[in-house]
Image: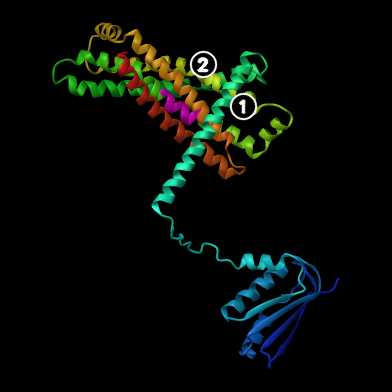
């Protein structure tokens, strides 16, 4: 094994310094220092070009790259041109990559596009998103049709696992949030109603608000951050690991096998969780009213029973079903669209939560408007 060496030869008439690299350049052995070359710059300040030749080079590792990078930086500082001859493939690219300034300030390129061009791009991007959503909904409908016909790739064991995750495992968080929402509604109602001596109508406010809207909305928001994000992360990781492509390769429809059980589990459990959230919200308002607002417990319950109509209950359950569909579709769609990287999984999870919560608010407004028109 020949030791690493460099041979220097300076042509003063051409202002060129030739550096001949030879031997084995290994980290375990002693390699020449770049200071030997830099001394030539001090001795011959007229040097304008350095030619590095590696025709005699044998084995090499990162020690050679370190030497070349230091030499290139010194030449760069002194405005000296560097030329590489007879180097192995890729060495010059690695040296050039290492010379890039890490953390250099990036100045955003000023956009020369007109307002109409930007508007058109936004329009076509929105159009593409809507078409992707409609295509995904079509696949889900076809998968449900095949499930009803008994031809879908569907495992009931997976369905019951998702039912537990979407239902029983979420009871603790739904209980806490719904109870506190009922407490907040009771306090807010008491602040205004006590001005008229009508504190007993706190029961009406808490009961109607929780059963008609708030129970379903708060449960939907909780499940968006808890279950919707979980669906997006699971399917995103499967997409990144090419597991979904593997399902397609063996002839298994990923929408039937992965999306359908998640969707059905949420659609089944969201109305039940909404009912439970309604109960916990009314319980929170009852506890505050009876303990701190000095209301008669029996009279409070009677007012709640009279105020809350069956129509309010059905409206709340419809909210729950719609929210379950929205959360499942948003989570699964973002997971299936995930890029094949860890950053893509994070973006898909964030997008699923944001999209689901935004869609829940919009759906609430639409359902409320429809109920107002129908007089429900």
Q: Is residue 308 above or below residue 28?
A: above
Tell me the number on the disc at residue 342: none
Q: Position of residue 138 (x, y in %)?
A: 56, 26
Point 29% across, 24% down: residue: 184
In front: 298, or 124? 124
Q: Is residue 124 above or below residue 14?
A: above
Position of the C terminus, as image quadrant, is: top left
Tell me the distance, in whole angstroms, between the alpha carbons under discs 2 and 1. Answer: 18 Å
Q: Quadrant of residue 157?
A: top right
Point 59% across, 42% down: residue: 339
In front: 36, or 87? 87
Q: Position of residue 208 (x, y in %)?
A: 30, 15
Furthest toward the bottom, the residue is 13
Q: Position of residue 295 (x, y in %)?
A: 22, 12
Position of the N terminus, as image quadrant, is: bottom right
Q: Is residue 21 above or below residue 144?
A: below
Most common SS among magenta residues: helix
Disc 1 is placed on an element classified as: helix
The residue under label 2 is 268
2 or 1: tag closer to the N-terminus: 1
Q: Quadrant of residue 250?
A: top right
Point 37% across, 15% down: residue: 315
The residue under label 1 is 255
Name the side, left or right, on which 47 lies relative to 57. Answer: left
The type of colouring in the image is rainbow
Disc 2 is placed on an element classified as: helix
Q: Is residue 31 above or below residue 117?
A: below
Can see residue 122?
yes
Q: Position of residue 334 (x, y in %)?
A: 54, 35
Q: Which residues are magenta?
A: 219-228
Name the side, left or right, on which 84 lies relative to 360. Answer: right
Q: Are marks 2 and 1 in contact (CB under 8 Å)?
A: no
């Amino acid at each position: 094994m020949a030791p690493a060496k460099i041979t220097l030869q300076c042509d003063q008439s051409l202002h060129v310094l030739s550096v001949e690299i030879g031997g084995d350049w290994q980290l375990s052995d002693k390699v020449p220092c770049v200071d030997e070359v830099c001394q030539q710059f001090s001795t011959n300040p007229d040097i304008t070009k350095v030619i590095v030749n590696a025709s005699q080079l044998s084995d090499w590792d990162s020690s050679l790259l370190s030497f070349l990078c230091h030499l290139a930086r010194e030449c760069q500082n002194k405005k000296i041109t560097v030329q590489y001859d007879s180097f192995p493939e890729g060495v010059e690219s690695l040296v050039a990559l290492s010379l890039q300034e890490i953390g250099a300030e990036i100045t955003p390129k000023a956009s020369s596009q007109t307002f109409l061009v930007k508007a058109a791009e936004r329009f076509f991007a929105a159009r593409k998103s809507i078409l992707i959503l409609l295509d995904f909904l079509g696949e889900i409908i076809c998968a449900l049709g095949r499930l009803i016909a008994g031809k879908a790739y569907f495992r009931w064991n997976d369905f019951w696992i998702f039912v537990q995750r979407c239902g029983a495992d979420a009871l603790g968080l739904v209980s806490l949030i719904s109870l506190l929402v009922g407490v907040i509604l009771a306090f807010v109602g008491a602040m205004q109603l006590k001005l008229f001596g009508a504190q007993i109508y706190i029961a009406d406010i808490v009961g109607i608000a929780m059963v008609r809207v708030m129970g379903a909305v708060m449960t939907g928001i909780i499940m968006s951050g808890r279950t919707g994000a979980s669906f997006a992360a699971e399917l995103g990781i499967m997409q990144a690991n090419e597991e979904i492509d593997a399902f397609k390769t063996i002839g298994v429809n990923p929408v039937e096998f992965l999306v359908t059980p998640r969707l059905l589990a949420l659609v089944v459990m969201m109305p039940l969780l909404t009912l439970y959230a309604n109960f916990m919200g009314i319980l929170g308002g009852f506890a505050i009213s009876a303990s701190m607002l000095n209301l008669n417990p029996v009279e409070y319950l009677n007012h709640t029973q009279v105020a809350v109509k069956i129509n309010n209950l059905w409206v709340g359950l419809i909210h729950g079903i719609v929210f379950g569909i929205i959360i499942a579709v948003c989570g699964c769609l973002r997971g299936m669209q995930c890029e094949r990287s860890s950053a893509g999984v994070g973006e898909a999870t964030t997008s699923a939560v944001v999209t689901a919560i935004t869609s829940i608010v919009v759906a609430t407004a639409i359902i409320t408007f429809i109920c107002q028109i129908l007089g429900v």
